[in-house]
Every structure is written in C-alpha cells, then in structure tokens.
Image (tube, grey):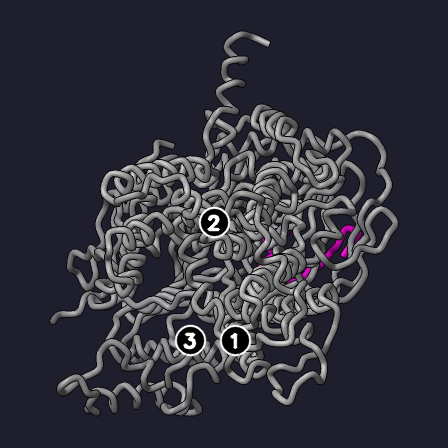
C-alpha cells in the first residue's frame, strides 16, 4: 500500500445538533507520524470532532480520508479495526485481569474453547516490554497506577497496528513524574509508525510534546500550524479566544456588604489551601478547566466530602454534613443534575419541596394543598414547561429538569446558593432564563456561587471571579470592562500569575 | 387571574399518581380473578370463605409492610421469616417456668408474660439493628446481610429449641392473644392488628414527611443525601420497624399455637417479597404502595384458595404462585407503559 503524506484529511466536516452546529465546516490535515495537538475552550467542538473520528457519532456532512481512502466508521470498534484507537479519560482496562490478559482481550485464540498461547500474544507482550519494561505481563492491572494503565492501553493500540491513537486529556489524573514517563513514551510512538492526536487543556504540554497544533473555537477550525512557529502561549491563547462577544456585564452599585461565607485554608484530596469570602448579594464565580477542583470545592463546602480547614457561614462554623449545611441556609445545584439533583421517577410535585419539607408540613404531616400550591408557584416562577404538577421529572427536557432542581434549592430558602455548571447541556433560551433568575436572586440580597468551566458564563454574571487550577485558587479578579481574557486563560491553563490584583 | 390561567391551574393538579393507577389496576385484576373463582370454584362465594381470603394471610401482610417500605428504598429484608421464628421461640422460652422439669425444653426463665414479650421484641429488633448497622452504616448490599441474619435468627431459634419446639409449662395467659377473636365471628385479634397496622402504614406512606423520604431515598439515594435527607438514619428506622413487625407476628403466632417452633415461618420472607411485587413495588426503588401490597396478598390468597377448592393437589401450590407472580407483574409493566404520560 502506498502511504500518503497525510494520515488523515478532514474536509468540510459538519455535525449538527437540534439547536446548535457543534462542528462547522472543519477542514485540516494531520501529517503521518507526528504528534498533533487539538486545543480550544470548552464547547469549541473538540470532543464532538473526536466522536466523529471514533465513530461514536455520525457526521451530518463532509468527508474524512484515512490513508487517502474514504473513512466513515459506524462504531468505535469499527474505527479501531480501520486503524484509529482512542485513549479515553475513563480507561478501558479490566482491573481484575492481568496485564497480558488485558492486552489480548478480545483477540484470544482458542481451541475448543480453551485459550491457546500463540505468537500473537508474545508479539503484543514484547511491544509492551519495549514501551515500559517495568510492567510485568502477569501483574494484575488493579495494582498499576493510572499512568501505567494508560501505557497498557497504548501498547495494545500499537500492537494492533493502529495508525492513529487519540489521547483525550491523558494527564488529567496522573502525577508529575508519571507525566514525564508518559511523554517519553508518546514521543517514542513516532518511530513506531503511529500518529498521535493529543487533546489537553494544559498549554505547556502542547509546547513540550506537539509537532502541530490545531485550534478550534465555536465549532470552527481556526488554524493549524507547526508548534515550532508559535513563539508564546499568549499567541495560542489569542487564537483560542478570538473576539468573543459577551452579554454585557453591569457592575453592581453600592459598597461591599458583609461577608456571609468565609472559607479559610480549605484542603482535601483535591483542594489545596483555598481561602476566600463571599459577601451578601454577591455573585462569585469559580472558573477553571475540567479537573481544576470546582466540583470538589462545592462538595466540600456543602459537607458532601471531607476536608480540613474552616468554613464560617453567617458567623458560625459549618458542620460537614449536607443536612446541617442546608439547615444553616446553603443549597447546592449539583453538577450531574440527573444523577445527583433530580428524583427522576418522581413527579415535579415530588421534587420541588424536598429540601424544605418543614415548609409544607406540620408535625411531620404533609399538607397536600400547600405542597401543590408551592409546586405551582415554582412552575410559574421559573416557567417550567409542563401541563401538570404530576408529570414525572424524567419526562422533562434538560432545561426544565434543571429548573426543577433550581426550584428545589430555591424552596429551601437558602441565603447562599451554590450552582455547579448550572447551564451545562441546556439550550440557549433556557440558559438566559437561568441567568435572569440568578441576577434576580442576587438583587434580592442572596449570595450566589457559580462553579463553571465556561468563561462567557462566568464573565456574564459574576461580580468576582476566582481562577482555579489544580485544586488551588490562582488569582482573583473583579469583573468589569477592563478584564483581561488572555490573562485568565493563561492562569487556568497552568501559567504563572505575574501580577495579581489582590486576592489569592 | 384570567379564566384561562385558572383552567391551567386546575389541570395542573389533577392526575392520578402512577402508584394509585397501579393499585387500581391490581384491584381490577383481583375482581376479575375473584369473579372467575366464584363461577368456577364450588362454595367460593360464601361470605366465610371471602373473609378467610383476608384473615388467613394476616402474617404475610404484617411483615409485608416492612418489606414493602424497604423495597421502596431499594433494599431487601430477607430476615423477616427468621425473626418470626426467633421472636416466637424466645417469647416462649422467657415465659416458660424456671426449673419445673427434668426436660430441658420445658424449662424457661419464668418471666411474666408482658416482660417475656417485651424482651422477645427487643431481641427481634436486635436483628434489625444488625441489618441496619451493616447496610446503613457500612453500606454492604442488603441482600447479603439480610440473607445472613435470616439464617442467624433461625439458627438461634433452633439452638434454643434444640431444633424442635418448646410448648410445655406455659402459663394460660400465653395462649390468649393469638386465639382471642371478636365475639360471634372468626376474626382474630391478629387480623385486627394487621388491619390497624395497614391503616397506619397507609397514613405514613401517603401523608407524612417520613413516608415521603422513603420514596426519595429509593428514587435517588445520592440526590437524597445532597438534599439533606439523613439516609442512614432513615434506613435504620425502617429496618428496626421491619424487625419489630416480624417480632409482633412471631409473638402472635407463638401465642396462637402456644408453642415456639424453630422452623415456623419458613419461606415467609419470599411470600412477603412476592406480595409486595404483586402490589407493584419496583425492585429498583422509589415506587410502590402498602395498599398495593395488601391487594397483592389477597390476589395470591384467591389463587391458592381456588386451587385448593378445585381439588388441585397442594403440590401444585408453588408452581401456581410462580405463574401468578409472572403474569401479574408482566401485566402491570405492560399497563404502566401503556399509560399516557
């Protein structure tokens, strides 16, 4: 077979979702035996593009050429057979089996149903050995570190003669020293005739590892160029942000009110010495990329996870358990609304009053009329689209489900509302409705904390923004017209903070 | 408020819950079966026979209450049969005269009846406490733990009775509770207690905050915790209540037969499970009702009674139960799926 210069050519690729075009006329080439990085903010279309490449989704239109031939995988398995393997964040290894069993899983040779040792196994094991001699083939995978599990997966992809290995944020969950080891192996893959598509939010990694980089923004392809011609991270950052237009943020009038929440030296398995204040009526944003520790921070304050340090709310120390925290006047809209916030098999009426049953009951007996009235009140207030209070929550759309979760928290009469990714997976209309609700609550004097990985969202509504990276607060910024986006992206992708303006 | 809006308001409140729909559906099934049985089985329509349909099953219904609530939270309680045996045997042992005979099985602790009963109930709840500790605190799957305590409870009962039963040197008062009936009828105190408990459970389920929590925990335990519900504490109470209900059943049965038998109530935990499922409880949690369970118990009773009435050999009972369970549960799923939402 004649090998083309480009291993992959993407032409006019489009993917439409009901309300949004996630991948918009993307065209670029990936050169054979290179490490090709893919960067962009959350929602830039990277993951959708990857899903199209791995056959997890079908494209709407456009063309992909693999080794110069038309390529349209109909499943990840199919993609693998055609030569594209993927290293997902959720690793695809079986912990209970040995390394060798994992490597040969799905391609065992058998005689009458019994496993047979063949040359194939020896060959795969020798590939494994050449990559990382310290992993023993008979070792149980559960005893390996995350990085070594990744190496096992890489070895499997190499041994099955993949042309391309896609790596989706492989360093998100591994330690510094392991990153170095992984990088050596990734760099070595070029000699093994493998092209790597590397996705990471940490820009430094791109400079260390990449041959080429492709920047995406709002579903479009912005640029593809050799990493060597990019002089500074700021150049890359500029490509990533472009000239995004935000809804105008209007600064609040009036002086700073009293601090309602004081967090001091909060530390746990993921968080590192975090301190900050939240004031009455203030909307505070916590911005950081995936894995920066936003959800962990919200859960710690809420008492859902253990922590060291001190959290004082309205002058009293908070006890670390959700029921006590709710009692004190804090409510959380969790990140995963379906699995953590909503009771999907119950009706809207069953969901709304959950966090404050006292309000609709007397001596432990529920007042059904009050309950219904309260539910109708919130259906009206948040404009939940339903024809009945008795509709099951599972039958509502994503935006309306989120409104039910929000109702639940509002019904708790909390003075401080924590919202973790409040608009993830919600259409544009519902999104701006939710922003409206947040602003209204703040005007009523309630304090809001927003944990988000979408910069426009944070810049749109927050008065104060904390930048998180790797479980620490790196900087604090007051929202206003002179906000420096480049600096924000610089900080949350792991760059050094040069000039702080107070805080952190 | 505009007229249109008012209409929307009214529409917003009116809808039968899926639980009620399901219970009504099962009542329909019951009536249909009942009609067929009246036509086909000789003497089935007699009032006494109809009464028996309910009264003969009082023990399954009482333990069914605890089992149903736990299933709604997404947990099993397989220990109820064992606890019935344990509570019965212990109440006898505590009440038997001390040092009255050469025969070890005739000697007990000689405690007054009231004290004996209270202590036996306490021991029953001890089994519930073990369940709660492992399931609510240590988060071990309930099916494993209650399978263990099922054998533990029965095992203790067997040790105390040496694998047989205790039935001698009991005071007369011991046999009163289980055999007392409403004058002129065959309705025993046990049946009245069962009806009382079903009513209390119904009120608990439909009208109390605590009842509501049971559903919330079953529907989504993670969200329940994050919504401020003390999941562990609630499960603990339910396991204690379930054990207490089984204990009460055990004491009533021991009194009825004036004997503590170690293999009493063998397999009742599965009967309780069957009637709960017949009543529409979802094994995935978050769905079901005590009233449904009650209807389920009567359905099962209609089937077994008519089988006996048709002179079907008792050997067929289990097969029949199996078929009824299958058909009824499939029919329910079908009806619920068809329901327009």
Q: Which residues are magenta?
A: A487-504
**Secondary element type, mark 2:** helix
Q: Residue A25 falls in which quadrant of the image?
A: top left
**Secondary element type, mark 3:** helix
Q: Does A491 appear in magenta? A: yes
Residue A401, position as x, y percentages in the image: 50, 38
Residue A165, position as x, y percentages in the image: 33, 69
Q: Residue A377 falls in which quadrant of the image?
A: top right
For image coordinates 48% across by 33% down, the residue present is A428
Q: Does A102 appear in magenta? A: no
Q: Is residue B231 visible?
A: no
Instruction: State which chain disc 2 sits on.
Output: B
Instruction: State which chain disc 1 sits on.
Output: B
Residue B23, position as x, y percentages in the image: 42, 39
Q: Determine whether, in the image, residue A421 is placed left or right of residue A276.
A: left
Observer-nearest of B188 and A263: B188
> Circle 1 sits on which residue?
B262
Observer-nearest of B19 and A343: B19
Q: Are marks 1 and 3 on the same chain?
A: no
> Circle 3 sits on which residue?
A150
Chief SS of the magenta region:
loop
Crowd tier of the residue under label 3, counting other residues whose Cα lies within 10 Å: few below 14, some 14–19, many 20 or above? many
- Residue A214 - label: none
Crowd tier of the residue under label 1, counting other residues whose Cα lies within 10 Å: few below 14, some 14–19, many 20 or above? many
- Residue B55 - label: 2
Crowd tier of the residue under label 2, counting other residues whose Cα lies within 10 Å: few below 14, some 14–19, many 20 or above? many
Q: Is residue A299 visible?
A: yes
Question: Quarter of the image containing the C terminus of chain A?
Answer: bottom right
């Amino acid at each position: 077979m004649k090998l083309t210069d480009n291993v992959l050519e993407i032409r006019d690729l489009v993917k439409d979702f009901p309300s949004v075009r996630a991948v918009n006329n993307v065209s670029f080439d990936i050169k054979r035996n290179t490490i090709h990085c893919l960067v962009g903010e959350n929602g830039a279309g990277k993951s959708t593009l990857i899903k199209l490449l791995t056959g997890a989704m079908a494209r709407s239109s456009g063309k992909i050429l693999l080794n110069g031939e038309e390529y349209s995988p109909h499943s990840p398995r199919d993609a693998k057979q055609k030569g594209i393997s993927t290293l997902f964040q959720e690793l695809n290894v079986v912990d209970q089996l040995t390394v060798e069993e994992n490597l040969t899983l799905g391609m065992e040779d058998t005689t009458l149903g019994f496993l047979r040792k063949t040359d194939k196994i020896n060959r795969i094991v020798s590939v494994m050995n050449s990559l990382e001699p310290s992993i023993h083939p008979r070792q149980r995978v559960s005893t390996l570190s995350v990085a070594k599990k990744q190496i096992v997966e890489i070895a499997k992809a190499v041994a099955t003669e993949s042309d391309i290995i896609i790596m989706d944020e492989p360093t998100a969950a591994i330690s510094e020293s392991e990153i170095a080891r992984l990088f050596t192996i990734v760099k070595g893959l070029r000699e093994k005739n493998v092209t790597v598509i590397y996705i990471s939010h940490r820009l430094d990694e791109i400079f260390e590892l990449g041959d080429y980089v492709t920047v995406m923004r709002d579903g479009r392809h912005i640029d593809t160029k050799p990493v060597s011609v990019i002089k500074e991270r700021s150049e890359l950052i500029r490509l990533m942000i472009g000239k995004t237009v935000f809804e105008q943020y209007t600064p609040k009038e009036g002086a700073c009110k009293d601090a309602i929440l004081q967090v001091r030296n909060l530390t746990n398995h993921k968080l590192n010495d975090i301190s900050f204040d939240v004031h009455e009526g203030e909307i505070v944003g916590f911005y950081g990329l995936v894995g920066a520790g936003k959800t962990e921070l919200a859960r710690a304050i809420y008492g859902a996870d253990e922590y060291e340090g001190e959290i004082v709310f309205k002058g009293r120390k908070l006890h670390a358990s959700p029921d006590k925290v709710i009692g004190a006047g804090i409510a959380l809209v969790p990140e995963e609304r379906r699995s953590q916030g909503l009771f999907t098999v119950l009706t809207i009426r069953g969901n709304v009053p959950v966090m404050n049953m006292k309000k609709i009951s007397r001596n432990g007996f529920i007042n059904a009329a009050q309950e219904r009235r309260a539910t109708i009140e919130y259906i009206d207030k948040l404009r939940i689209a339903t024809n009945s209070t008795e509709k099951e929550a599972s039958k509502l759309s994503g935006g309306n489900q989120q409104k039910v979760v929000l109702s639940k928290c509002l019904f708790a009469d909390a003075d401080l509302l924590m919202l973790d990714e409040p608009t993830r997976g919600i259409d544009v209309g519902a999104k701006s409705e939710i922003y409206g609700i947040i602003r209204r609550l703040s005007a009523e004097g309630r304090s809001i904390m927003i944990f988000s990985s979408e910069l426009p969202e944070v810049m749109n509504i927050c008065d104060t923004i904390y930048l998180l990276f790797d479980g620490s607060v790196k900087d604090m910024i007051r929202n206003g017209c002179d906000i420096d986006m480049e600096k924000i992206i610089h900080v949350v992708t792991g760059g050094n903070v040069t000039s702080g303006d107070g805080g952190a | 408020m505009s007229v249109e809006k008012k209409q929307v308001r009214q529409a917003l409140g009116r809808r039968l819950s899926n639980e009620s729909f399901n219970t009504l559906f099962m009542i329909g099934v019951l009536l249909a079966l009942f009609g067929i049985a009246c036509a086909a089985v000789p003497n089935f329509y007699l009032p006494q026979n109809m009464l028996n349909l309910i009264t003969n099953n009082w023990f399954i219904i009482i333990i069914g209450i605890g089992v149903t609530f736990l299933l709604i939270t997404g947990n099993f309680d397989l220990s109820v049969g064992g606890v019935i045996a344990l509570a019965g045997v212990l109440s006898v042992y505590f009440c038997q005269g001390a040092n009255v005979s050469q025969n070890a099985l005739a000697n007990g602790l000689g405690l007054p009846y009231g004290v004996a009963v209270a202590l036996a109930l306490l021991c029953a709840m001890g089994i519930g406490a073990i369940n709660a500790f492992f399931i609510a605190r240590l988060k071990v799957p309930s099916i494993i733990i209650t399978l263990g305590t099922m054998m533990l409870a029965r095992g203790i009962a067997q040790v105390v009775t040496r694998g047989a039963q205790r039935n001698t040197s009991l005071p007369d008062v011991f046999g009163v509770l289980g055999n007392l009936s409403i004058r002129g009828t065959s309705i025993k105190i046990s049946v009245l207690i069962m009806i009382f408990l079903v009513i209390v459970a119904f009120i608990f389920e439909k009208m109390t905050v605590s009842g509501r929590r049971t559903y919330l925990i079953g529907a989504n335990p993670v969200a329940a915790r994050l919504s401020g519900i003390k999941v562990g504490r609630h499960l603990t109470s339910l396991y204690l209540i379930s054990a207490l209900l089984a204990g009460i059943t055990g004491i009533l049965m021991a009194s009825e037969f004036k004997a503590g038998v170690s293999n009493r109530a063998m397999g009742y935990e599965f009967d309780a499970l069957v009637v709960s499922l017949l009543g529409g409880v979802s094994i995935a949690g978050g769905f079901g009702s005590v009233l449904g369970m009650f209807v389920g118990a009567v359905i099962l009773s209609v089937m077994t009674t008519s089988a006996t009435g048709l002179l079907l050999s008792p050997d067929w009972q289990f097969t029949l139960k199996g078929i009824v369970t299958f058909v009824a549960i499939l029919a329910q799923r079908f009806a619920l799926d068809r329901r327009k939402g």
